[in-house]
Image (cartoon, rainbow, N blue to C red):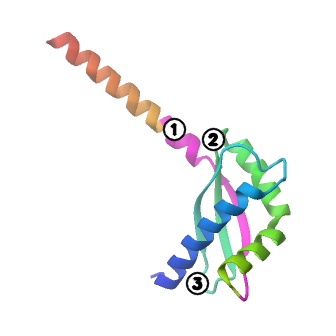
Amino acid sequence: MPSHRVDRATEDIRRELTDILRGLKDPRIQGMLSIVRVELTRDFSFATVYVSAMEGLDTAKEACRGLESGSGYIRREIAARLSLRHAPKFLFKATDAIEYSAEISKIIKDLKGEDENEEGHTR
């Protein structure tokens, strides 16, 4: 069972990573990027960061390559902002969570439209 300390640190890291992402100048890290989830090990040595892009999985993969190359800067910034003696090593993984959720929303919207059309014809 994860401790409250790990949960709190995970959320702090996620918040700070989002802020750091906005300031990075790497051209691979552009567009609508979102940090979906951060998984931190109990000993704070590794953090897996799941990154998603509105443009799709290929853009998220390219952004992960850019984030990997800037991971030293990101670690230093996280350590300074959160007053950590040792910042975790970051593993960036691309996910299509934003694209997937947009697709699900579209399906639900389409189904609601069909339901309204069916109700309109029966009355």
Cα–Cα gap, marks 2 and 3: 31 Å
Tag 1 near tag 2, CB within 8 Å: yes
Tell which of 117 and 85 is nearer to you: 85
Q: Which residue is mark 1?
A: 102
Amino acid type, residue under disc 1 in the picture: Ala
Q: Is residue 88 visible?
A: no
Which of the two discs, 1 and 2, labels the residue nearer the N terminus? 2
Say which residue label 2 marks: 54
**Rendered location of residue 12, percent (x, y):** 58, 73
- Judge whether 123 appears above or below 84 on screen: above
Q: Residue furthest bottom?
A: 85
Alpha carbons under labels 3 and 1: distance apart:
33 Å
Name the kind of residue labelled 3 in the image. Arg
Q: Which mark sits nearer the N-terminus, 3 or 1?
A: 3
Q: Secondary structure at mark 1?
A: helix
Q: Secondary structure at mark 2?
A: loop
Which residues lie in the magenta part?
Answer: 85-103
* Disc 3, SS: loop
Report if the CB atoms under discs 2 and 3 are less than 8 Å apart: no
